């Protein structure tokens, strides 16, 4: 496959992590970059030798040479920028979450249908080596029948940019919803969520959200499975943790409690003291074109003086970045739906949005829209 996709990256904080990946991907051409601050735009452009540069997103979308945009802007901009790009005839990859309202999620799904363009939410966890390891166990039948899924995302967001303070925990839930839905490609049907604890008064007033922790149960459509997810962002003492756990009839996978330790596999029908076993999660660089395999182990933000908070706290996102870029480019080359596609991304994002609404209503059951048929 010699075809190349001309990619433009929007937002050069976390977004700069993907520039060298696209530059070295055999089917991508890292064509353009966009950043509002011209000095930063030029610094990154000069560093990576990218000639086409924009400070105005609307002007970028007029460029007929651009096939696809990869959006890494602040969360409040995701939906608007995604819709503009789709309607300008560009494919879209967007960092999480898809949007901040269920209505915008619906609008994006409709726009992909109307334009014929593809959308992929760049959810890191479903391409992290831990998820790929569990997915391999599942596909080989080693887990047996999956009985339950659980995930958490706990993080101290103090010191992050101004759109984060006081954010309802479940409004940024895709890192824990994605893996529990994504392993068996399940669709969340309804959700119930409880809030717990209270954050400081100065944070509460920003979003009128008091909860320190939000914990939700998700029921999946046409399945006997449910999942449990929980989130915290402020005023909870916890090392960063994006955990994902699966309980099967033959084997179960549990995330380590402390960053840097090994996960545990529990195997049924062994003597009790032999049931748990620590395992080393392998790398899955062999899934990738040879040119970008090295990016599973390092990236732009490995250096102490160039460390984006999401990369430092997220432990490098499990080597997911080259897998994400490769899935997006491959889907465009092969003219197929990426994973997660628009309706899946809308479903995962809306679980969190509606979970928070449920928490405000004391745990009320809230049904999700049927995004495949909106």
Image: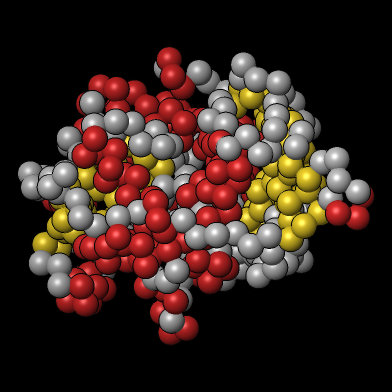
Image quadrant occupied by the C terminus: top left
Depth order, front residue of 279/269:
269
Residue 370 position in % (x across, y down): 50, 18
Extreme residue in the right direction: 272
Extreme residue in the left direction: 64
Residue 290 position in % (x across, y down): 30, 60
Q: Quadrant of residue 331?
A: top left
In the displayed structure image, the side of residue 54 where residue 17 appears, left or right? right
In the displayed structure image, the side of residue 123 where residue 258 appears, left or right? right
Residue 295 position in % (x across, y down): 38, 66
In the image, residue 63 sits, relative to residue 235, either above or below, namely: above
* Residue 335 can be seen, yes or no: yes
Identify the residue at horizontal 41%, vertical 37% (top origin).
339
| Colouring mode (rainbow / by chain / secondary structure / one colour) | secondary structure
Identify the residue at horizontal 78%, vertical 45% (top origin).
267
Identify the residue at horizontal 41%, vertical 58% (top origin).
285
Depth order, front residue of 239/270:
270
* Residue 163 can be seen, yes or no: no
Identify the residue at horizontal 24%, vertical 57% (top origin).
25
Extreme residue in the front direction: 270
Image quadrant occupied by the N terminus: top left
Residue 232 position in % (x across, y down): 69, 54
In the image, residue 352 sits, relative to residue 40, either above or below, namely: above
Q: Quadrant of residue 87?
A: top left
In the image, residue 321 sits, relative to residue 148, either above or below, namely: below
Q: How many marks?
A: 0
């Amino acid at each position: 496959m010699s075809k190349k996709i001309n990619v433009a990256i929007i937002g050069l904080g976390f977004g700069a992590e993907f520039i060298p990946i696209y530059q070295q991907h055999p089917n991508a051409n890292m064509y353009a970059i966009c950043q509002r601050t011209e000095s930063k735009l030029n610094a990154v452009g000069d560093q990576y030798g990218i000639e086409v540069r924009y400070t105005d997103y609307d002007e970028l979308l007029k460029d007929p040479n651009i096939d696809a945009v990869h959006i890494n802007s602040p969360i409040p901009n995701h939906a608007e920028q995604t819709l503009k790009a789709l309607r300008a005839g560009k494919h879209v990859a967007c960092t999480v979450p898809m949007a901040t309202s269920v209505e915008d999620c619906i609008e994006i799904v409709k726009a992909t249908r109307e334009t014929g363009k593809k959308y992929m939410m760049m959810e890191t966890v479903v391409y992290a080596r831990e998820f790929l390891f569990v997915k391999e166990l599942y596909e080989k039948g080693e887990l047996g029948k999956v009985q339950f899924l659980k995930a958490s995302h706990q993080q101290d967001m103090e010191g992050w940019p101004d759109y984060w303070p006081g954010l309802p925990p479940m409004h940024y839930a895709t890192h824990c919803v994605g893996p529990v839905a994504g392993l068996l490609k399940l669709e969340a049907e309804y959700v119930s969520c409880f809030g717990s604890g209270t954050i400081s008064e100065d944070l509460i007033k920003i979003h009128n959200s008091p909860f320190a922790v939000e914990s939700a149960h998700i029921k999946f459509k046409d399945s006997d499975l449910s999942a449990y997810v929980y989130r915290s962002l402020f005023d909870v003492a916890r090392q960063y943790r994006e955990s994902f756990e699966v309980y099967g009839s033959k084997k179960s996978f549990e995330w380590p409690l402390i960053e840097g330790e090994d996960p545990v596999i529990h195997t049924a029908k062994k003597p009790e003291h032999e049931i748990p076993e620590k395992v080393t999660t392998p790398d899955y660089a062999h899934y990738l074109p040879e040119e970008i395999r090295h990016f599973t182990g390092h990236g732009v933000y490995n250096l102490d003086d160039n460390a984006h908070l999401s990369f430092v706290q997220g432990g490098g996102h499990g080597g997911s970045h080259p897998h994400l870029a490769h899935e997006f480019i491959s889907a465009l080359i092969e003219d197929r739906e990426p994973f997660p596609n628009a309706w899946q991304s809308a479903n995962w994002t809306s679980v969190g949005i509606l979970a928070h609404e449920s928490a405000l209503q004391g745990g009320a059951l809230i049904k999700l829209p049927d995004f495949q048929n909106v």
